[in-house]
Amino acid sequence: MVEIVFLTPFITGILAFFLPKAVGRSFLVGTGTVHLCLSLLLWKNRPEAFFSNYFAVTPEGLLSLLVISLLFFLISIYTVSYLEESSIKSENIFTGSMLLFLSTMTMVTLSDHIMVMWIAIEATTLASAPLIFTYRTPAALEATWKYVLICSVGIAMALLGSVFITLAMDIGNVNAPLSFSALTEVAKEINPTWLKAGFVFILVGYGTKMGLAPMHTWLPDAHSEAPSPASALLSGVLLNCAYLGIFKTNKIMHAAGLGDFSGTILMVFGLMSIIAAATFILKQNEYKRMLAYSSIENMGIIAFGTGIGGIGVYGAVICLIHHSLIKSSLFLSSGNILLGYGDRFIKNTGDMVRRMPKTFIAFFGGFAGISGFPPLGIFIGEMFIIVGAFRTGHYVAAGIFIFSLCVIFAGFANQVMKISFDDYSNEDSDEKTTFKEKASMVWPQFILLLTSLILCFYMPDTLYQTIIDAVNAIGGGL
Amino acid sequence: MILNPVDTILSLVLLSVLFAFGASRVPGLIKVIAFQGIVVSIVPFFIGHEMALGGTVFTIATLIIRGIIIPMSIYIAIKKVAIKREVEPIVGFHASLLFGLGLIVASTYISRELNIPSISDFTLLFPTAIALLVTGMFLLIARRNAIAMVIGYIMMENGIYLIGTTISVRARHIVEFGILLDILAGVMIMAIILQNIKQTFDDVDTANLRTLKE
């Protein structure tokens, strides 16, 4: 039963490579719908997996799965219209890769075995590389090359980390399956030195994929060169998948009583990412790269919150959910901007409020959400993290954190104002040919933002309980 | 001290690591990874963990893939598309060699400190693995030729494979499966990309890939 959720997009993805365009597009939406239904069923029933050694339904996995499902469903609706507007040469490859990408990410959320998780994360790289290369320009090629190479090295590090964990088990004479749930139970007996080494390598490996500085260099390129629906997926859910790998390993560390060690490292990487994002976001001249750096910032916030523990972990998970919803909506809006202006530089855009009012609402709303306007979701999450940092006595770290957030907000706001309100100077563009905002290209963004907004004021009990279950395992909670 | 057969062949791998640091042309590097691929896949036979039929089949498959298929396909690739043979170093060869020597000393020292019980009989096993890992990473960073970078990546994986297969039986099972999948897919994709770099830039010098930066 559990396995069906990732097998469905896998099969449709393979088929989409060979079928004509129109069928591929309907496959995209169809699979999105089926996947969403299956995920909701999974959420409700929480069944045992058929291969229970390798797959399991965990609270943190369910959270990510539901986010992935919802996002993919909305993005697939957007993608169909986007494909009509833009000129993508080999559409079969694009739709097929999108579906395979969905399949591999679903597999990450459901995997319980260390190696299955590793294989699934590796598979996400392979499935998403063709997406980044879609436009076949030299810049797209460079981005893909960097992405594949850097992430492969990262994933190799994670493999080494997994090997070290098995060594730690051997030295501690532990006889258990190599699954996260089994290891968490016997964590006390595992040799701590090698477990620490394993955690560090896994953190560096999956952290590369998650976009933590200083391993983040592929991220701005990949996210800006990919077509916008693919960027939305990359930023909205792929980063969460990598985080899930770190989260689950961190769970073992906490069960082994090494939570302080893993927390400190996570905090350092988190702060570095936030500082890196603050440094680079100020002088960004492309809007998609700016959004990519904002993703690095948010991943940094999430890692920092996870490292702090206690109330901070809860804040991190809140940030994780809201970041996915808002950032994917922003990337979809950036797709509209790209289609509307035909340019990725901020200086060649402007006056969006009059030229594309609906996109403007989506983009500006997204900006308000992502930069943490009170009382929106990210703000709540960040508040929890800051409170957590003060409670645990990390005053300096909290200071750097708050300062960087201010800098990022200033940089982001400056660019968004330029896009939205500056005069648009390109006179030779014919007013009649301007981009028409179809309902299917703005409503997905609105729904994403609305979901985020509703979650700020009303969180269903089942969702709340799942979050609490997830964070309890690593010493989190309200 | 009498060297056992494993240490004897691993000492040759260490020499090949030094050769990789000094190699100025891609064909030489291909020979190095072919040799290393063969050695790292036969080492598990000598370690003395009991090996089931499945394990033997996996090991032979790895031997064929790492020792023959991958080096051959890279060799054919450079022959067919007439790619530049020079590795185009960012760090010069003398400095590279010096780094290599330092690396071997450091890795020997580190593994003496770590002293892993399951492989303590084989003095050179862990140092070689570390050396392979770091050399691979060095080639990735300090060579500009795209194929030399792919070779660096494969060398890194060889190092991980060497640690994984020998350190424990449990680790061997995971590494076998993981790496086979990884290396196959990785090389295929990289080959496709290389093909495209070739078409777009008429060359695989990654210096052409330096436009996206901050």
Image (cartoon, coloured by chain):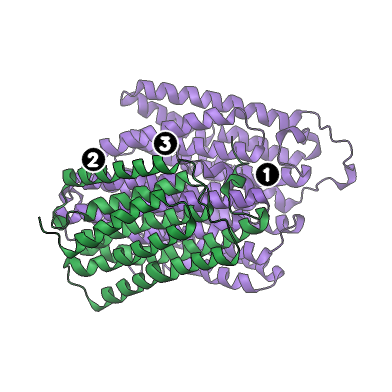
In what quadrant of the picture does the N terminus of chain B appear?
bottom left
Chain ID at mark 2? A
C-alpha gap between disc 3 and disc 1: 26 Å
> Please, what secondary structure does the residue beneath circle 3 have?
helix
Q: In this view, does A213 lie to the left or right of A417?
A: left
Decide: is B93 above or below B62: above
C-alpha gap between disc 2 and disc 3: 21 Å
The residue that mark 2 highlights is A258
Q: What residue type is labelled 3?
A: Gly
Chain ID at mark 1? A
| Most foreground residue, A21 or B115 | B115
Decide: is A307 above or below B122: above
* Whole-percent x, y for residue A115 in the image: 34, 60
Question: Are tags 3 and 1 found on a single chain?
Answer: yes
Decide: is A336 above or below A70: above
Which residue corresponds to the image point at 53% horizontal and 48% vertical from the top-left?
A: A146
Specify the quadrant of the image occupied by residue A95.
bottom right
> Please, what secondary structure does the residue beneath circle 1 have?
helix
* Whole-percent x, y for residue B46 in the image: 19, 68
* Whole-percent x, y for residue B62 in the image: 35, 70
Q: Nearer the viewer, mark 2 or mark 3?
A: 2
Q: In this view, does B65 lie to the left or right of A149?
A: left
> Chain A hue?
purple
| Most foreground residue, A323 or B187 | B187
Q: In this view, does B45 lie to the left or right of A211?
A: left
